[in-house]
Image (spheres, rainbow, N blue to C red):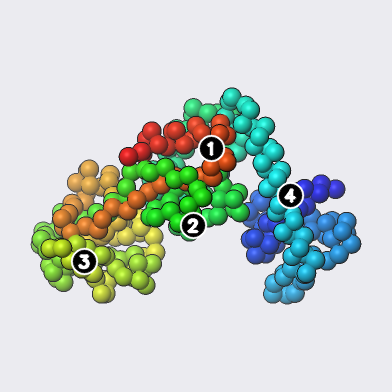
Amino acid sequence: MDKLRNMEVMVAVVEAGSFAAAARRLQISAVMVGKHIRQLESHLGARLFQRSTRQNSLTEVGAAFYEDSRRVLEQVRWAESAVERSRAVPQGLLRVSAPFTLGSRVIAPLVAGYQQRHGQVRVDLQLSDGVVDLAGDGFDAAVRIGRVADEGLVARPLRPYAMVIAATPDYLRRHGRPERVADLARHHCLSHSVWQRRVEWTLREDGQELFWPEQARFTCNQGDGLRQAALQGLGLVMQPEVLLSDDLASGALVPVLQHCLPEPRSVHLVYAPDRRQLPKLARFVEHVVEAMGT
């Protein structure tokens, strides 16, 4: 019986919330997850989970074992990293988290370039607009937009995240080019549905913050969906410059209201200070900062 593997699976079940979610994280079957848990319970002579048709909750013994297992696995990772730090050639698995749009448009190509330089490194790039727990979720580094709340992390500043408002030339011929925020009242605005639940576009004009639109003609929960709608001439779109850059360069989209755009948001590459000497991470940080550093 591989005790460490069983402990790793048990911790994954707790943190992922279910056997099925843990199976996806570990890239094994849910049946295999159950087998690991049964082996562990048999070895310990105690039930770790209280099973029901709806959920699996920790028993009192399971909760205590989970905390101890997390500490043991962290010590194992630290011991492994000590060996890895002694190697001159970057190698092993590098796990990176990045926001979806910035990650797909900028970070993914950078990862490809990094791996071309360092062929012995495997990279797991996870794109999500949620904020991951680097240590708890097993990530080596993350790209974050906005303020970095965790002061215990090293935060390397990258190029700011700027927004652009744009539309097709045909749309602007039909509806006119907006020159001031008030002009948006006669335009069709395309809105991200996540933004719509909070406050939509926060624009700046004459020293004031202005919000628009109160209602949108078209909403979508994904930036590229809004981009595609704009390219069809459906209306004005505000999305990150990195998403629209090719369309702006080709003339398929035309920028407007450039004097009213929100302030660019800060971007950082973050990682734990005790892992900065890992060759795979150190070279990755150098590669990203060289390409995107301020």
Q: Are marks 3 and 1 in contact (CB under 8 Å)?
A: no
| Residue identifier under label 3 | 209
| Residue identifier under label 4 | 72
Could you classify mark 4 by the number of other residues whose Cα lies within 10 Å: few (under 14), some (14-19), or many (20 or more)?
some
* Image x and y of residue 30, in percent: 72, 58
**Residue depicted at x 73% and y 75%:** 53
Q: Is residue 237 above or below residue 250?
A: below
Q: State the SS at label 3.
A: strand
Q: CA gap, disc 1 to disc 2?
A: 20 Å
What is the quadrant of residue 226 in the picture? bottom left
Q: CA gap, disc 3 to disc 4?
A: 51 Å
Residue 276's tag is: 1
Residue 131's tag is: 2
Q: Are marks 1 and 2 in contact (CB under 8 Å)?
A: no
Image depth: mark 1 or mark 2 in front: 1
What is the quadrant of residue 180 in the picture? bottom left
Q: Amino acid at mark 4?
A: Val
**Residue depicted at x 48% and y 52%:** 151
Q: CA gap, disc 2 to disc 4?
A: 25 Å
Judged from this view, the residue extending furthest toward the top is: 88
